[in-house]
Amino acid sequence: MYFDQIDKINIEELINPSYRILAHIKEQTKPGQERQTETLVEHTELCMRYFTEIIQRKSLEQVFINIEKLFFGNSSKGAKTLFWEMLFHIIIFHDIGKINPNFQKLVLKNDIKVQVKETNDSGHSLLSSIIYLDHFIKKAEQFPIEDRKRLIEFLFLNAYCISRHHGGLNNFSEFEDKFSRQGKGANAGAGLNILESKGLFDKTFQVNIEIKEEKIVRYFSLLNREKSNNREQTITKFVYERLILSLIFASDFYSTTEFMDGLETKDFGEFTNFHTFFEKYQSGERYRNIKEYKEKIYSNELIKRDLHKIKDINILRNELFLESEQILKKNLDKLIFYLEAPTGSGKSNVALNLSLELLKQDKTKNKIFYVYPFNTLVEQNLEILKDVFGHDEFIYEAAVINSTTPIKTDGHIRKNEEEIKKTENYTEYINYYKRALLNRQFLNYPLVLTTHVTLFKYLFGTEKEDIFPIHQIANSVIVLDEIQSYKNSIWGEIISFLSVYAKVLNIKIIIMSATLPDLDVLSLASEEQKKRTVKLIKDRNKYFLNPVFKERVHLDFSFLELEQPEEIIAELLEKVKLYANQNKKVLIEFIRKDRAEEFCRLLHEGDNVECEIELITGDYSTAIRNEILQKVKQKDKPMILVATQVVEAGVDIDMDIGFKNISLLDSEEQFLGRINRSRGKDDSIAYFFHLDDSKVIYKEDVRKQQELTLKNKEIQSLLKEKDFPIYYERVLKKLFEHTRKYNDHNIEVFFDEEVRLLSNYKIQKKMELIEEQEDKVTIFLNSKVKDIDGKILQGQDIWKQYKELLELKDMDYSEKRVKLSDIKARMGLFTYEIHVNEIPPYSDRIGELYYIEDGELYLENDRFSRKKLKKDLFI
């Protein structure tokens, strides 16, 4: 390792041996026991051990080599050596500020008999960063100007991370404010107070602190003035600070947990049995069928024969699977792989194979992330993995990480917890929860299924737990499904960040969709950056224009000629009833929930509808949705399913006829994927109508403009011909113009100002995929609800359990966090989001969560009824 070649400070030589400086104390609960203490030297040595092990296990040395090459490629050997030396000593210095006598006395109850008259400051993180700066600034100043600038830049980045290692990220400018009396915020000038209060360290620290206020201010000024024409370097510094803070967090947390709980961390969440895992995958029926097809039919050369006459969808899926695999193997040096494939062509299976193949080919890759737009897709793909790997130990490698899934645990202890608590294994019982929480916080799982929203929190969030897993993302394979689902006003920023994350952290990214834009156009990618990407399907038309995909559903735009809402509703009712009475499965999708509910009511009140009618909206729980979908899936059973956009993706249904309120072209294509999914019918039709405008949902999306929707006959033709590249040429042209204007959307201004200056709060806000709505609150409706396993739950019981759990004062923090995640998953069956001015009379409240005792007043057929809510409010 590079770290083996650098000079390392012996921390014992920095601390005055006259004082016993502690890092942590552990109070004993049994009478007569003395508290246990851990010295600062012991803690630092343990942190160094974990830091080194993480670097080795996660193959992170290459990550820092990447950064060295990007910033110090032309520098002297001495400058490069100092870069590595500064890097390693972040861990050594991160807690050195605990020499503060006030910290020892007030926080650790360790009175070392040193009086600090100038201040009662008991902090240690900022003092640690100042000592770190003082030690290395002298070394950096010995180099010529260009090397010095780079070294100072990383020195201050490192010091900033040290100062934040007990909190999340804030704006880098707030670190600067700590060395300015005129700075903003309560902590302005805090660093100057430390420099002026030598009593904080002049007795406990063996070395004189020589750094001066003027020098720090001068270097901050230099950093602010230093512009860069290299966007890659700008983004790399953003990635670097997150990686460094993640490593400090991990090393510190693991070390502290080992001392406080005797819980040594040995599993860091990488694949340890990948060979066996891959063999299990290859032994599956699907893979064996493809392998047999390859051996008998498939050429070793990329297919040149015409597939247009192929009618068997499984042959087309085999072709797509094998072609993408072959191109991937020929381009293993690439970082981003684009998989553009028709709806229903087996993208999930292809992506699984490609991600496993990347791990097989590159031994440094040790983790896989499967990332989807919606929780329903996460759940659906977990089921796919279960089908592939069965329910044995292999599926235990996978963890679902989102807001609705409990923290992953071992069911044995949970089921027998009361019995275990009474035995001598109580410590083991508590440590089980501590390990479960630690694994969740740091993503210590080799295979993670999550959502784009969660992944983007990790990539751009500022909270501590957002940053914990960044070192886990390094050397991973990330599969991004339907990235274009989110606001396209930041597509350029997204691909710019992803490209640098991939290069710096050695990540391989697979981006897949049926409607995939050329994102490199928006990012202004350099020729060198473009060489890092490859399309896994050379000729998309070979698949998209095959009748199996192209002509699976006939498109009808006649409803778009109607303008009056009453006329549209009447025509829809007549047409839907007609098909229902022909024993068809009919799907009709609206944009607004109230419109869907009203149409469903009209169907129920009307005559001559002999089949079952069901409604699904975002207000329905997973259990109710699954119950309805099971009815829908019954073969040859006619049904009308009225829904909102929740059915567009992640819902495995096969309908005969579809009706849809137009929105974005991507959504129209997703909707078509729910019609004639099995390709067993010749008369499937999708009708498009325009009742409600999608602008309310897609506020800043240029695709909502009328000339880019099915209102435009040219766009209708593009959907028929599956010519999404032409469509996206138009979209990207508008986006390019939009993001080049000098306004809040200007991509160059964003990177040159906010990212360069590490304005982390603004970056986080800019990169939010879903903006929080301040006028929304959550209500909890007390009622009886069936969960996904068919068990009946009573809302008041769940609410009582939640309150009791919150109020427990003596429960271990980790146990409480794990149990809260479990109960919150069940609470999701009773909670609904409403506008703040719609809150009905409530019986209890916890924060912005309102408990409605008479919750059943607002249900209709066991479903939440917004109509009943509004009727009750405005009587």
Image: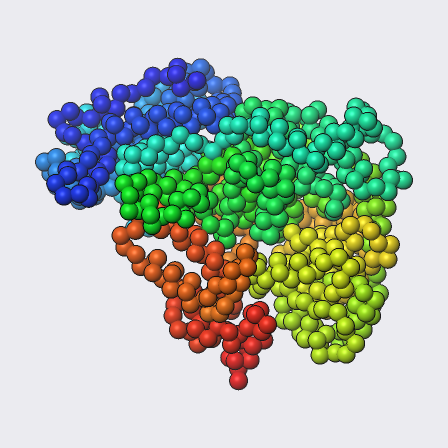
Q: Is residue 333 visible?
A: yes
User: Is residue 200 shown above or below 642?
Assistant: above
Q: Tally the marks.
A: 0
Residue 402 located left or right of residue 742: left
Residue visible at 50% across and 50% down? 405
Based on the displayed image, in which of its 4 quarters is residue 332 positioned?
A: top right
- Please state which of residues 80 and 834 is positioned toward the viewer in this rendering: 834
Task: Tell me, yes or no, if residue 232 can be seen here.
Answer: no
**In this rendering, would 91 be left or right of 391?**
left
Q: Residue furthest right?
A: 309
Q: Is residue 26 above or below residue 527?
A: below
Q: Locate residue 211, reporting x and y percent.
A: 27, 30
Q: Quadrant of the N terminus?
A: top left
What is the residue that sits farthest to the bottom in this orientation? 875
Q: Position of residue 291 (x, y in %)?
A: 74, 29
Residue 123 sits above or below residue 356 on the image: below
Name the colouring of the figure. rainbow
Answer with the quarter of the image where residue 413 lies.
top left
Q: Is residue 94 left or right of residue 411?
A: left
Instruction: State the residue in front, 717 or 127.
Output: 717
Along the line of sight, which residue is nearer the eye, 119 or 249? 249
Image x and y of residue 121, in percent: 21, 43
Q: Position of residue 599 (x, y in %)?
A: 70, 72
Q: Residue at x 44, y 23 (%)?
A: 56
Residue at the (24%, 30%) spot, across then down: 40
Q: Residue at x 71, y 79 (%)?
A: 605
